[in-house]
Image: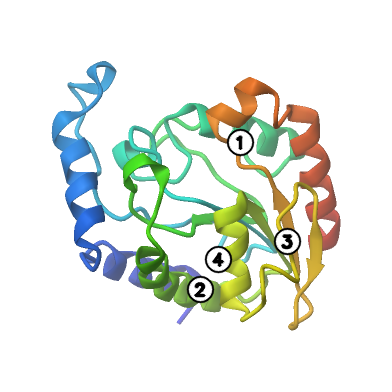
Amino acid sequence: MPADQALQALYEALLDCRRCPRLVAWREEIGRRKRAAYRDEPYWARPVPGFGDPHARLLLLGLAPGAHGANRTGRMFTGDASGDFLYRALYEMGWANQPTSRSRNDGLQLRGLYITAALRCVPPGNKPLAEELRHCAVWTERELGLLTNLRVYLALGRIAHEALLRHYGLSPRAHPFAHGAEYALPDGRWLVASYHVSRQNTQTGRLTASMFRAVLERAGQRAGLL
C-alpha cells in the first residue's frame, strides 16, 4: 500500500481512539465550552492526526494539540500562536508553501517534512500523564513505521524528546534534553532537540526566531533538505 494511503488508514483508526478517559473527557469539554472568540465555530475535539509529506526526511514531534488550536481545527499547530511561529519559520526555510496555518483546509502543504505529536489529544494543563504517553506511543510507533524516508527527528520540547528516546529504548540520562542537542540514533538517524514553539517560550524570548532557525538549519542539513 502506498505511504499516503497507509497513513490515511492510520488516521481513520486514530479518530476512534478513546483509550484515555481523562483526555477524552477534556478534549470534548473544551469543544463544548469553546473560547469566546471561536464560539460560532465547530471544534474538532478528537485525536489529531499527523500532517505532511508522506515521503518526509525530517519529522517534527511536538507535545500535544493546543486546546483552542489543533483541538479546534483538527490539524497540528494550526490556529494558534505556536503555529504562527512554527509555520512562518518553515515557510522561510522553503518547507511550507505558505507562512500561516488557520484551518485544515487552508491549502497548506509541507515539503520533505512531517509534523505530529507525542500525544494526540489535548491534556489538561498541557501536562500528560505517563500512562497517556505510553498509550499514544502505540500510534507513534505505527506512524513512524510508515515514514520510511525519515533521516532526522526534531523534538520540540523535553516531553517530545523523551518520547522519541523511549521509542528507541534509549535513556534520557544518557541523552539529556537541551536546546540544540544532537544525538545519533541506533538506526543511523539523528535526534535534534529544540525548545518548544509555545507562546510562553516565544514571548519571553526563551526561544527566538533566530534560535529556532539555527536548529532548523542543522536538522535540515542532516536530513539532506538543504
Under circle 3, the secondary element is loop
Contact between labelled residues 3 and 1, with CB atoms less than 8 Å apart = no
Q: Kindly identify which residue carries mark 2.
A: 3
Contact between labelled residues 4 and 3, with CB atoms less than 8 Å apart = no
Mark 3 vs mark 4, foreground winner is 3
Mark 2 and mark 4: span between their CA atoms? 23 Å
Under circle 2, the secondary element is helix
Image location (x, y in percent) of residue 166: 57, 74
Q: Earlier in the sequence, mark 1 or mark 2?
A: 2
Q: Kindly identify which residue carries mark 3.
A: 176
Under circle 4, the secondary element is helix
Mark 1 and mark 3: span between their CA atoms? 23 Å
Q: Kindly identify which residue carries mark 4.
A: 163
Q: Residue at point 73% right, 28% down?
A: 208
Image location (x, y in percent) of residue 188: 79, 79
Q: Quadrant of the N terminus?
A: bottom left
Q: Kindly identify which residue carries mark 1.
A: 86
For this view, does 164 lie left or right of residue 138?
right
Q: Residue at point 30% right, 37% down?
A: 72
Mark 3 and mark 2: span between their CA atoms? 32 Å
Q: Residue at point 19% right, 37% down?
A: 31
Q: Earlier in the sequence, mark 3 or mark 4?
A: 4
> Which residue, as the protein is rendered here, is positioned at the far front?
173
> Which residue, as the protein is rendered here, is positioned at the far top?
37
Type of amino acid under label 2: Ala
Type of amino acid under label 1: Leu
Q: Earlier in the sequence, mark 2 or mark 4?
A: 2
Crowdedness near tag 3: few (<14), some (14–19) or many (≥20) residues, C-alpha within 10 Å? some
Q: Is residue 6 above or below residue 217?
A: below
Type of amino acid under label 3: Pro
Q: Is residue 159 above or below residue 44?
A: below
